[in-house]
Image: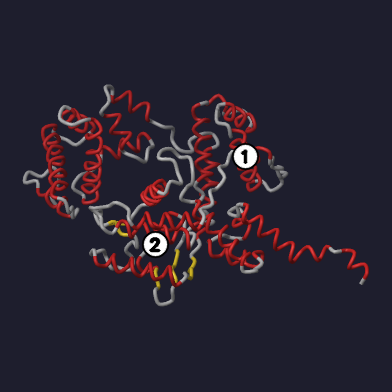
Amino acid sequence: MSRWPDPDRMRIGSYVAKLDLRNLKSRTCYQQVLHSFQDIVEQHGRLDQQALQAWLRELASRWATSTLLHRTRIIDRFLDHLLAAGAIDHNPVEALREACHLKQSMPIWRALISCNPEQALARLRQPKPFGSVLGEVMAEHVAMMRRRGYKYTSQPARLLQFDRFLQLNPQLETEPLSVMIDQWAATKGARNHAYERENLERLFAKIQQRRNPSVPRRRPDPRPQKEVRKQWRKPHIYSPVDVRRMLDIARSYPSPRATLRPLSIYTMLLLAYCAGLRRGELARLDLGDVNPGHGTITVRQTKFFKTRILPLPDSVMIELRAYIAARREVGASQDPHSALFWHVQRRSSYTPEMITWLLTDVVRRAGLKPPQGQFGPRVHDLRHSMVVNRILEWYRLGINPQDRLPFLATFLGHRDINSTLVYITVTQDLLHLANERFRAVGAPCLNLEREVRS
């Protein structure tokens, strides 16, 4: 196996060819960046931090800083490829990431391109995760919860913040836990810091209870959570007219270079509303998850580790079949494990972030959301709208929604109806139909005078 840097530069040629870049301009750009990088490494004599800085200085005079930082992504992927192939012994960017306890490479490159790289890297260095006096206890709790099958992502982030605070304040090591939490809470300037403090105290109460069952249970304080709920933004309920307008806009979405994109956005919007799918569920749908014969789609391993099979109306399945046929015509992969929503230019799937951006743009074009900012309706409000409009339809058909809530909870992928109740936003139409049903069904039961006469 040849090492890098290789004199004949076959490594760069085979790597770029393997990327299957469809645009000639992209292939040229990759080759120029990689050849310039190899020139600097060969001049420097070794692949280390100084070689990275020399390459950045060499190209800083020819490219804008934003362009240069964007080109570093090419170097990152190339170094990862070389390390996996055994062509280099170490990746200096990865070593700096590990030293700073960072997951992303871009902060490292920004530090290296600064006027004082060593000082910038020193500011980036974070304390070792779970390295405080309580770090072992917290790490043990996180590992135990994940062994039990929980994703457990938000709680470890809170524990890591507290752990970092303890490492930066070693004078608190001998203080009681309550004092540590008080000092940590005093540094929080957010409006919901009382809620964060309550969550941290509740979390440590669970840890102490697990380690010592004789410890009395802590009674939670509901007031901080109530204050936070007052700040929550009320969901926007799209009317069927709004949804139809957005579907029409999605069909005619301007995309001259990617002809499949308008139909992809249309189908995403259709499934987000009619099936109540989350953005991550849309991104993870595979071609094999659609069963046209049975009229169902399979949503795999979503929130709470659930997999569910959803029956879809015939009208939705007709549109889904049309999208799959159009997808086949543009040459998308027909592997059952390939992404249902196929990005033709990138030859890969749409990310959840890209799906959110596209659907949000459709909402803006429909005039339902301001041209800029985070105000106004959200993409996730389609899921809320699906629930409310479904309950409205049940009321109009004379169906008691209470009897159908367990089925709706299963359809949405919830553990129980308590999670589904969060999606029921009381609108004027819903309140009116609920009152009408009570007047027709419930009010006669309260006619005490007739009951006494009988």
Whole-angstrom CA distance, mark 2 to mark 1, is 35 Å
Identify residue type, mark 1.
Answer: Lys
Q: As displayed, is residue 298 above or below residue 111?
A: below
Name the residue beneath numbered marker 1: 230
Q: As displayed, is residue 226 above or below residue 248?
A: above
In the image, residue 99 lies at what x, y percent?
Answer: 35, 35
Q: Quadrant of the C terminus?
A: bottom right
**Residue closest to the far bottom:** 293
**Secondary structure found at label 1:** loop
- Residue for point 47% across, 70% down: 313
The reply to whether callout 2 and callout 1 are in contact (CB within 8 Å) is no
- Residue for point 59% across, 67% down: 407
Question: Position of 93 compared to 273: left or right?
Answer: left
Q: Mark 2, residues whose alpha carbon is within 10 Å: few (<14), some, or many (≥20)? A: many
In the image, residue 5 lies at what x, y percent?
Answer: 13, 42
In the image, residue 16 lies at what x, y percent?
Answer: 16, 50
- Residue for point 14% across, 46% down: 25
Identify residue type, mark 2.
Answer: Leu
Place residue 180 in its image quadrant: top right
Question: Position of 264 compared to 368: left or right?
Answer: left
Name the residue beneath numbered marker 2: 285
**Secondary structure found at label 2:** loop
**Which one is in front in this view, the residue at disc 2 or the one at disc 1?**
1
In the image, residue 125 lies at what x, y percent?
Answer: 38, 30
Place residue 203 in its image quadrant: top right
Residue 280 numbered mark, or none: none
Which colour style is shown? secondary structure
Q: As displayed, is residue 254 above or below residue 227?
A: below
Q: Mark 1, residues whose alpha carbon is within 10 Å: few (<14), some, or many (≥20)? A: few
**Residue closest to the far left:** 8
Q: Nearer the viewer, residue 159 or 438?
A: 438
- Residue for point 21% across, 47% down: 82
